[in-house]
Image (spheres, rainbow, N blue to C red):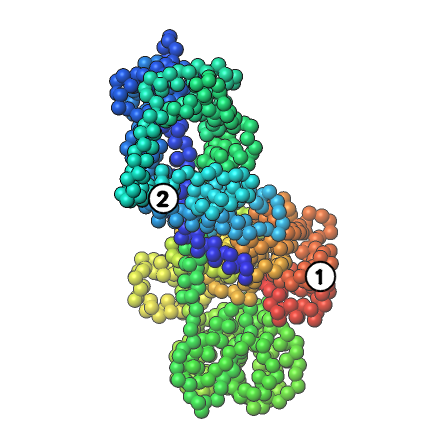
């Protein structure tokens, strides 16, 4: 819950403050190279042609501007020792708080072209600090900077793995797609930039809040500089002080006289032009003779009063950064250099607090780090964009999930009607769906209904209910669905009298398994009969979700209950997908060819890890042509009541049935039912934006490829349309917490397991153990790169592989399970959930036996009932 709360705050603040931080990042990156950009844009202002004469001294520059413009007020003069570099003077200019820098030729004092781009950088600075809206903007940028600290720290916390490797933390995975790739960019690059963003934020707040700035001085143990006279920088305060002075003089003539005397004294203390010229000349000569060290630039601040002191600022020949200035005073009356304060002699904490802007922009650490700081700042919008993309995808998935919920009908219930108990045993969700649809139809007929999964039934449920409908799926070779196995073991052995019950059974199965067709439904029906229960009608069998069979169930209910029930069917609405990629996973394998199939669709779609893709197969062009020739039919003949011709209509029809000749085309075609659908475990998650399947070709005794596998691996061409629907497979869905999972599978069963592990990686859960088996490592190691990358980055805590044909004694996954018996027990003790996907008749059966031998049958049954042993086998 704590982590979830952090996540909610993280994304909420991210989508609100992210835009401001993006603006600050871009503007900060631009402003950090202000000097370099301006020098590049203004070569005529910053560089001059070297002349044979020496550069003008500060005194000569001052005399020059006094001669041509006596009204010009100079604040300071800067001399650069580089022969090609211009000099500059800082002059008083209205609206410029720190004066205006004017570039001059150091040999002639000629004013050089004005620096272009000053207004642009001033705008960039205002946008960076105030969003160009003054104090309001300052508060917004300050608050956003505080949020940046939270983003960085919470982001690290949210992606903190249980196993730490440098790849897990810092390696971008370019093979990821869709939401996975977006999240990877957001998280991994965010980790790269943690130190940069913390530096940006902690130093940026120096200018945002007084309390933060004071705290920095205290934490670093540096004495904060004395604040300047607010009246000097605050026009309102200055005006107020002046008003107070005027009020004081109005009532006291002596005060007025005293004030005038002070003003005359201040005027007398100011230096005239000749004195300033002499002071500059003396200071220039004395400084160069006494400093005893090389420097690159020297700035002389013109004295404001006749105290004999001139303030100097000089930069070393190779400075640590652009603001690593040394300070000194020069007493030109006694020709003595005093109060020298060298930057290099300062302690690190003093350097940091005295160079906050270079630390903020990275130049404090050198040009390479400054460039990295600039790139980090430019990357800020990446997190705003990817954060929004992740947020919108989550919203989209939530909307789709909400729209997919089927609400029970709100209708009046007959208080005199006997209640119905509708129970179901489902492996892949079809029986559950039919149970709820049956319930809905009864409720629409005003009947009271309770729906329960069969594993939750107790003896009391049989004793207290008089009308029971059982919707029961058969799984595997005649077994009950996994969750219903305990019911079969315990309840079907219960000795009780059920003569008070009227019941009916809807048994689901597949005629592809004739020896076990609908066996579980028939076993429950026989048990009910033995206990004296009365059939409402004989058991209805449903072959592969056939609508015709389901309508028989609905009709039988109508006849037995005399209720008006609406038609009921399993709605199969197929969407149009496009085949984007098909690649052979096992070239030169001893087994049948197995393909990686990837599909895309333009419509909104969502599914969960563990769900199933139901594909509508079709007939090849050759098969259709053969059928048309056999029955002497015209391929271009229009089909009655259809907007297509005969060849197009036959694409999804069962052409193997024996058709009776008929002169009427519509009656002839009515004999051709649709081809049965085929189901495949999905190997991807929606965030990857592609639906991936793993399909092995099935071949009959005549060498013909199977209906579904042939369609998907041979007949459909790249970029052709595929009719597909996604069916929820709740019994194989992933848990929504960080408990460990153990994934066991073989062959194409890797598909369902990969979707689970992709989803776990997306959630940041690393307690994942995969046990996978195939024939030969050299040819059948499906998705080797991905599996090993998961192992190396900590997505998989364990990866155990069984390649049966790589040694004389065949090794299968159940052998590995027995070898890891103690570790298996430890994982189960740690609340692990087991997922099994793959071959039912061999692998799943052997794994089940191994689990019973290792854990005990009672524990395995308990795991099933608790939803900790889940299977998707076929």
Residue shown at 29%/42% (left/top)? 252
Which residue occupies the foreground of this view, 227 or 482?
227
Q: Residues within 10 Å of mark 1 (few under 14, many from 20)?
A: some
Where is 816 relative to 664, above or below? above
**Apparent side of residue 352 relative to residue 80 in the rendered image (left or right):** right
Residue 612: % across, % down = 50, 61
Residue 182 visible within the image: no
Q: Nearer the viewer, residue 392 or 874?
A: 392
Under tag 1, what secondary structure?
Answer: helix
Where residue 130 is drawn, which disc sits there? 2
- Residue 681's spot in the image, x, y percent? 53, 59
Residue named by callout 1: 825
Relative height, residue 207 to residue 748 (above, below): above
Towards the viewer: 188 or 731: 188
* Residue at figure coordinates x 49%, y 84% from the top left: 420
Vertical order, 57 against 313 (above or below): above
Rendered location of residue 840, percent (x, y): 61, 63
**The N terminus appears in which quarter of the rendering?**
bottom right
Residue 437 in sight here: yes
Between discs 2 and 1, the one toward the N terminus: 2
Residue under the image location 73 percent in, 58 percent down = 822
**Residue with the most extreme top position:** 52
Choose mark 2 or mark 1, whichever is in front: 2
Q: Residues within 10 Å of mark 2 (few under 14, many from 20)?
A: many
């Amino acid at each position: 819950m704590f982590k979830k709360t952090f996540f909610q705050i993280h994304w909420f603040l991210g989508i609100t403050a992210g835009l401001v931080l993006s603006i600050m990042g871009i503007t900060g990156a631009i402003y950090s190279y202000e000097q370099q950009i301006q020098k590049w844009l203004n070569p005529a202002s910053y560089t001059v042609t070297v002349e044979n004469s020496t550069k003008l001294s500060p005194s000569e520059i001052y005399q020059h501007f006094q001669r041509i413009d006596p009204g010009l007020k100079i604040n300071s003069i800067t001399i650069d020792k580089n022969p090609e570099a211009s000099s500059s003077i800082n002059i008083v200019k209205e609206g410029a708080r720190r004066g205006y820098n004017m570039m001059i030729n150091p040999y002639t004092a000629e004013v050089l072209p004005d620096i272009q781009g000053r207004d642009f950088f001033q705008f960039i600075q205002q946008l960076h600090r105030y969003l160009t809206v003054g104090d309001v903007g300052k508060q917004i940028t300050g608050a956003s900077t505080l949020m940046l600290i939270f983003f960085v720290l919470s982001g690290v916390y949210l992606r903190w793995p249980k196993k730490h490797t440098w790849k897990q933390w810092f390696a971008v995975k370019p093979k990821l797609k869709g939401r996975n790739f977006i999240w990877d960019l957001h998280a991994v690059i965010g980790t790269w930039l943690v130190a940069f963003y913390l530096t940006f934020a902690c130093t940026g707040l120096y200018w945002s809040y007084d309390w933060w700035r004071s705290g920095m001085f205290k934490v670093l143990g540096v004495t904060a500089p004395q604040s300047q006279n607010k009246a000097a920088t605050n026009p309102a305060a200055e005006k107020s002080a002046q008003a107070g002075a005027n009020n004081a003089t109005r009532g006291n003539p002596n005060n007025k006289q005293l004030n005038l005397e002070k003003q005359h004294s201040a005027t007398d203390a100011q230096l005239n032009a000749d004195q300033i010229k002499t002071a500059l000349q003396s200071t220039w000569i004395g400084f160069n003779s006494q400093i005893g060290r090389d420097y690159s630039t020297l700035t002389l601040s013109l004295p404001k009063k006749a105290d004999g002191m001139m303030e100097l600022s000089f930069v070393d020949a190779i400075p640590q950064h652009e603001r690593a200035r040394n300070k000194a005073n020069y007493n030109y009356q006694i020709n003595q250099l005093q109060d020298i304060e060298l930057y290099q002699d300062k302690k690190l904490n003093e350097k940091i607090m005295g160079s906050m802007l270079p630390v903020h922009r990275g130049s404090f650490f050198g040009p390479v780090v400054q460039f990295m700081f600039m790139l980090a700042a430019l990357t800020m919008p990446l997190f705003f964009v990817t954060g929004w993309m992740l947020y919108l995808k989550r919203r989209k998935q939530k909307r789709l999930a909400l729209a997919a919920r089927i609400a029970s009908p709100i209708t009046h219930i007959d208080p005199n009607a006997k209640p119905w108990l509708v129970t179901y045993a489902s492996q892949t969700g079809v029986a559950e769906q039919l149970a709820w649809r049956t319930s809905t139809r009864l409720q629409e007929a005003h009947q009271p209904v309770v729906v329960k999964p069969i594993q939750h039934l107790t003896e009391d449920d049989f004793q207290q209910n008089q009308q029971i409908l059982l919707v029961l799926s058969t799984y595997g070779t005649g077994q009950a669905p996994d969750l219903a196995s305990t019911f079969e073991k315990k309840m079907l052995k219960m000795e009780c009298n059920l003569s008070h019950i009227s019941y009916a059974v809807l048994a689901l199965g597949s005629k592809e398994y004739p020896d076990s067709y609908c066996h579980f439904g028939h076993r429950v029906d026989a048990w009910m009969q033995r206990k004296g229960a009365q059939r409402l009608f004989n058991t209805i069998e449903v072959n592969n979700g056939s609508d015709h069979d389901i309508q028989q169930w609905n009709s039988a209910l109508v006849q037995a209950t005399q209720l008006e029930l609406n038609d009921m069917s399993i709605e199969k609405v197929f969407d149009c997908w496009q085949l984007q990629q098909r690649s052979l996973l096992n070239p030169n394998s001893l087994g049948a060819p197995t393909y990686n199939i990837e599909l895309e669709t333009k419509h909104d779609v969502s599914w969960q890890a563990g769900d199933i893709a139901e594909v509508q197969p079709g007939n090849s062009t050759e098969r259709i042509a053969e059928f048309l020739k056999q029955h002497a039919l015209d391929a271009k003949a229009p089909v009655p009541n259809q907007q297509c011709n005969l060849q197009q209509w036959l694409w999804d029809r069962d052409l193997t049935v024996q058709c009776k000749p008929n002169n009427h085309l519509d009656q002839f075609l009515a004999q051709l039912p649709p081809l049965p659908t085929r189901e495949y475990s999905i190997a991807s998650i929606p965030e990857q934006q592609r639906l991936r399947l793993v399909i092995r070709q099935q071949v009959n005794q005549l060498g013909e490829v199977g209906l579904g596998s042939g369609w998907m691996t041979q007949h459909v061409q790249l970029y052709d349309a595929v009719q597909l629907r996604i069916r929820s497979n709740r019994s194989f869905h992933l848990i929504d917490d960080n408990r460990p999972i153990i994934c066991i599978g073989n062959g194409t069963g890797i598909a369902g397991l990969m979707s689970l592990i992709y989803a776990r990686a997306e959630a940041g859960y690393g307690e994942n153990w995969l046990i996978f088996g195939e024939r030969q490592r050299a040819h059948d190691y499906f998705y080797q790169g991905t599996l090993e990358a998961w192992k190396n980055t900590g997505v998989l805590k364990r990866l155990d592989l069984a390649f049966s044909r790589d040694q004389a004694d065949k090794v299968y996954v159940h052998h590995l399970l027995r070898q890891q018996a103690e570790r298996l027990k430890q994982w189960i003790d740690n609340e692990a959930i087991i997922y099994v996907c793959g071959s039912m008749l061999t692998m799943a059966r052997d794994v089940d036996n191994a689990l019973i031998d290792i854990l005990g049958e009672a524990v395995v049954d308990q795991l099933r009932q608790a939803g900790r042993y889940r299977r998707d086998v076929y």
